[in-house]
Amino acid sequence: MIETLRKAARSIGNPSLQAWNEGGGKVLGYPCTFVPEEIIDAAGILPYRLRGITAGTMSIGDAYFGPVICSFPKCILQLAGQGSYGFLDGAVVVNGCDSMRRLHECWRKASEDIPGTLPGFFHYMGVPHKATDYSIEWFKEELGILARSISDHFGTPVTTDSLRRSIRLFNEIRSLLSELDEMRMSETCPVTGSDAASIVLAGFAMPREEYRETLGKVMARLRKSKPVSDGKVRLMVVGSASDDADFVELVESTGAIVVSDCMCFGARSFLKRVDEDADPIEALAERYLGGNLCPRMFGWYKDRLAFVRDRALRSRVDGVILQNIRFCDLHGSENGLLERDLEAEGIPCMRIEREYGPLVETGRIKMRLDAFMERIRTVGGRRS
Amino acid sequence: MRESTREYRFDWMLWSILENASRSTDGTPKEYRSLLDLVPHFSEVLDTFVRQGEPGLRFLRLIARYADMCSSANERGKLAALTTFCMATPILHAFDVVPVMLEALTVLGTVVLKRGTSEYLDYCCEVGFTETSCSAQRGSLGAFLAGGAVRPDFVVCDTPGICDTNANSFAFASAFLDVPFFQINYPPTLTDERARAYHRADFASLVSFLEERTGKRLDEERLMEVMRELARQDALASELIDLMRIRPCPVPGIYDLMLYGGRFMMSGTREYTELLESMLEVARENARLKRSGTRTGVERARGLFCYIDHYTTDARFWDWMETNEVSHLGSILFTFWNADAPYARGREEQGYTLDCSSLDAALDSLCDQMSRMPMIKQIRGPYDAPGMWLDDVLAEARLLQADFVAYIGSMGCRNSWGMNKLLVRDLERQGIPAVILFADAFDDRVASWETVTERLSEFLTVRGIIS
Ligand code: SF4
Ligand code: SF4
């Protein structure tokens, strides 16, 4: 069961996606957790979170983006340009951050040179950087526009009923993943961090009904599993977008176990539920914009610090890895503040800048990890 | 940061250098020339301004006053807001708040200080900020983080939705210094009704924030006074830009810095109006004599800078332009988008009109003005969307008959580096020679000024723009 999820997490395609495709199902890609998947799902379309794993070169990404750009959107462009995203029927690009938002232009321009690489439906959505009554109102309108555009293009209406059904489905998935999250944070963590990452990541790429079934079964088994955390150094990973189970595996190869995270390909994507009783679009706008866990929501550092601190304490971690992709200033600089404030509270931190997924410099990172582990083992982990 | 750097406050140092510079010609010309020998580290930059005559001296006095306003804000009991160059300041003046602009102070430090701002740039990284972040803020932010400048009472920025790297610097400053933060956040479009309603709601919320922080009501009289002055300044700047259309361009290259620098720091003041008037006088006279604004009076080429300028130590950028007889046709920072500006002709709906007929009308028009500030207008949406970067650069290149367009920015600018290759390609397709200069406008260590000029000269020669 978990093997299916591991495979889906480590590749762009997966058998369930392929079967969906072959059955005539449509797929719509999106790069950032500020895009409500429910709207796509409500149109009967599979929401697929765009990733850059498996990109072996940057020849296309570098031709359009400049040199000082986060390699996450560059890798997405690379894969799109080399045809790996041929299964997409559409894509929604948002202004998550500056690097991400320029994917819109770079992808369009790349497709002029490499015809056929731009999906038939290509939509740009503006996401405010703050949650106030008027910005949520704006976002609500953006969601309405997205829903109408999808309906018009694909001829599959997004209705209040279909939205409510999707919201329920995604909330069920969120509940299961939140349970997984609690299990990991407990003293008797039954799953490695890399497997936990695979479980979450697969959920961005599989038809969701099927994913919910598989996830349910995996959870049933995990409820009965023995702890795998005994004697290991407990760590938490925080920072830039990281959809790389191999990275977590690398961390765990040093004798650690990753029991918690604060990342948008991890806990940040599932912790908050959508209100099932309110007007669906309103509820989605509240849920997606109302959270302030990504540093793109400028000015809420204290809330994020409280969130990270709370999770670190609840999961009894010995240390926190604060990672950012090079040129991701949002997470990079917030990691600087987190390091200052968490260390002041006796929580050891390791701050590291890295390349995105397939480009990670494993040797250098391993060396830093070993040194961090040595610090924890000799000086001690979190002082409680 | 070295002990010796910490010993003097950054803003005070700027003020004292600029204040002395602005008085350097109080004596006789002979005394001035002897003075240059006594200040070897400042003589080049000082002379860059002094040789402009009246406008150069006025500019020195203007920036000295701005540096004084910033550095003495705490002592004078004024509230200081740490803010960004693309924040329109009249609203802050209406609350008697001093706008302490990171980028403006970085430019002053880069151009004037012997070692540029490298120590302040690096200090940011010492305390946890990323080295890949934009140097335009870092160049002075380091001084604030180290406690070597006026302590801001709060942070106000209007770059979220426009430039995250910029906004992030202000968010970092607010968290690090533990002072309140307010952001104006822009949608990706400009002229549609939704965007307008959003701008207004956001602006109203800024006014409430300022009321709360200052404990005051907005000073309507002061606001109107500033706005009326601003309207005069818009008209003067428009005439100057109109003159730049003439071949040869009668406007000296350094006027570009004086126009936007003065506007960012001191818009709405009488001093800035007088500066513009003195600049116009020189430019009109050059136009009458059919002289170029370069030092020799000859124009070999006309260049438009599609983003910002290069602020290398000693103002060598403008010196290079003058020496090579290349007219500087301005940059994106040059365009503030009053609806009657020459570049807004035919696109008036993208501009703003100041309206002082009532307080509500004034606030609405200020909100329109702020949402069209340089950079705020051009890069909020896709670069090739109507009214955005490509449209504006093309329109200006045609209006001012540019022979070439060059991109210079900061290496931290994700936004422009995310689309400058596409922009340059489109410009070339439209028949406009264009070049990306790989350099950092505020940090010579990324690429030395010599490397930059070599690259630019090579481009101009290879493309047959200058022989
Ligand atoms: S880090 Fe934030 S802005 Fe970037 S992809 Fe994740 S949710 Fe979006
Ligand atoms: S990791 Fe950071 S820079 Fe990269 S896409 Fe996400 S928010 Fe943007």
Image: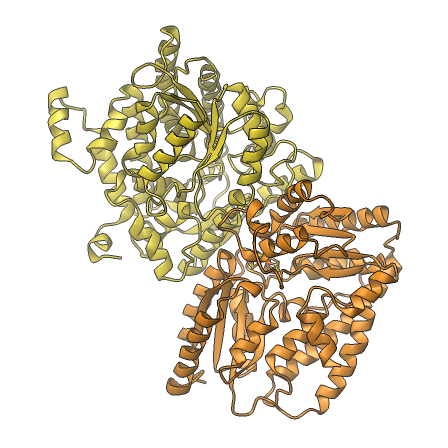
Chain colours: A orange, B yellow
A381 w.r.t. B1: above or below: below
Q: Is residue B250 visible?
A: yes
User: Could you tell me which quadrant the N terminus of chain A lies in?
Assistant: bottom right
A346 w.r.t. B419: above or below: below
B118 w.r.t. B370: above or below: below
The one nearer the camera, A15 or A157, is A15
Q: Is residue A317 left or right of residue A36?
A: left
The one nearer the camera, A158 or A2, is A2
Which percent across, then down, holds residue B439? 40, 42
Q: Is residue B255 left or right of residue A262?
A: left
A197 w.r.t. A117: above or below: below
Q: Is residue A207 visible?
A: no
User: Could you tell me which quadrant the C terminus of chain A lies in?
Assistant: bottom left
Total marks placed? 0
Which percent across, then down, holds residue A24? 87, 59
Q: Is residue A162 left or right of residue A105?
A: right
Task: Tell which quarter ligand 1 is in.
Answer: bottom right
> Residue shown at 69%/64% (left/top)?
A12
In the rendered image, the residue lying farthest to the front is B462
Q: Is residue B63 left or right of residue B202?
A: left
Which percent across, then down, holds residue B270? 38, 25
Which percent across, then down, holds residue B84? 45, 43
> Residue shown at 65%/93% (left/top)?
A226
